[in-house]
Amino acid sequence: MSDDKPKRAWNFNAGPAGLPLPALERAQRELLDFEGTGMSIMEHSHRGKAYEGVHREAIALLRELLGVPDDYHVLFLQGGASHQFAMVPLNLLPAGKSADYIVTGGWSEKAVEEAKRIGTARVAATTVVDKKFARVPKQSELQLDGDAAYVHMTSNNTLFGTQFHEFPDTGKVPLVADMSSDFLWRKVDVSKFGLIYAGAQKNIGPSGVTVATHAANDSLYNTPPTFGIYLVRNVLAYTKEIGGLAEIERRNRAKADKLYGAIDAKPDFFRAPVEKASRSTMNIVFRLPSEELEKRFLAEATKKRMIGLAGHRSTGGIRVSAYNAVSIEAIDVLVSFMNDFAAQA
C-alpha cells in the first residue's frame, strides 16, 4: 500500500521559516471548530472569551519560558520588526537627545537610517569592511554615549551569519535589542534590556506578528493578528512540552556544532567567512570554491527536498537557517549531503 501522506520538505528558509509539526497539526485539528465553538479561531472576535483565552495563554507561556520579570509587559503587535525601526525612536528618542546604534549587518543599517529620519542617531560601533560584516564588535570597541536615550543592537545577523554571544554592557543607558532571528533560541536575562522586539516568523510563529516587551493596551488596542498569535501560542505550548528553552538551546547548539564541524573538516572546499567567536547558531553561512559549484549544490539540494539554502541576494553563497523548528535529523541529512557533494565535486 502506498503512503499518501505528503512528504514534508527539509525547510532551511531564513524567514518566514518552518514551524514545529505538532504546532501545525494542532492548528489543522482545530481549524474549522475551535474548542467546540463551531467556528475557527480566525472567525472569533478578538474581544470574545474564546480568543481572549488564547491571547492570555500565549502571553503567560512567553513569560514563563523566557522568565519575563513582572515589571515588563509582553505585546503581540502587527507588522514585522522593520516597523519597529521607526517605532523605537518615535517612542524612546525625545527631542534634544541622541541614540546609539551598534551596526553589525544590513538590518541594523536600516534601523539607524530610520532613526535618523526621526531624531539624532549615531553609530557607536560598526564592523563593516568592504560592505561585509565578518564579526560583531568587542566591548572595548563600543564608543558609547553615557547620556544616550538608548543603545540599539541586532542580536543575530541573518545576512552575514554573525551573532552576539555576550550582550554589550551599556551601563545606565537602556539596551534595545532586535532579536528577530534568534528570539527564544536560548534563555536570556530580560532585565538587562529596556526593550526586546522580534518578528515572529523565524522561531515562534508566522509572519505578521511582532513580539515586544513594553506597555500599551495589552495588544488589544485594535484588532491584533489573531490567527498568528494563536499559532504562536501553539509553538510556545509545544516548546514548554519538550522541556522549554533549556532543551531548545541544547538542540540548537548540537545543530550548529554538526554544521560548523562539517564546514571546518573540509576547509579547502567549504569556507565560513565569519570569525569563529562571532559565528551564529541560527544562520550558518559558507561558500564553495566557485559560484558554479554553489549553483550545482543548491540545485541538487532542491532535488532532495532541502529548501531555502541560497544565501541572501546581497551576499550569495549558502545559508543554512537552523531555527528552533529545524530538527537535528534535518541537519544530519544536510551534513550527509554536504559530505557526498564535496567528495563527488
Image (spheres, rainbow, N blue to C red):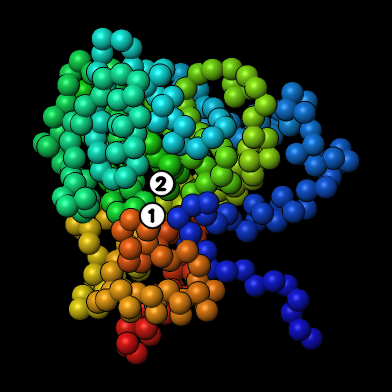
Regarding residue 243, the answer to whether it shows in the image is no
Q: Which mark is residue 182?
A: 2
Dividing the picture into quadrants, the one containing residue 55 is: top right
Residue drawn at (32%, 83%) of the image:
342
Residue drawn at (45%, 36%) of the image:
81
Q: Compared to 100, does 16 lie above or below?
A: below
Q: Which mark is residue 282?
A: 1
In the rendered view, does 257 fall on the left or right side of 67?
left
Dividing the picture into quadrants, the one containing residue 56 is: top right
Dividing the picture into quadrants, the one containing residue 225 is: top right
The location of residue 86, given as percent across then percent down, is 41, 26
Task: In this rendered view, identify the residue nearer to me: 308 or 337.
Answer: 308
In the rendered view, does 328 fall on the left or right side of 120?
right
Residue drawn at (64%, 52%) of the image:
23
Circle 1: is it few (<14), some (14-19), or many (20+) Cα within 10 Å?
many
Q: What SS does tag 2 mark?
A: loop
Q: Which residue ends up furthest to the front in the rendered image? A: 117
Q: Which residue ends up furthest to the bottom in the rendered image? A: 344
Query: Image quadrant for the N terminus?
Result: bottom right
Q: Compared to 193, does 202 lie above or below?
A: below
Q: Amino acid at mark 2?
A: Asp
Q: What SS does tag 1 mark?
A: loop
In the rendered view, does 96 fall on the left or right side of 224?
left
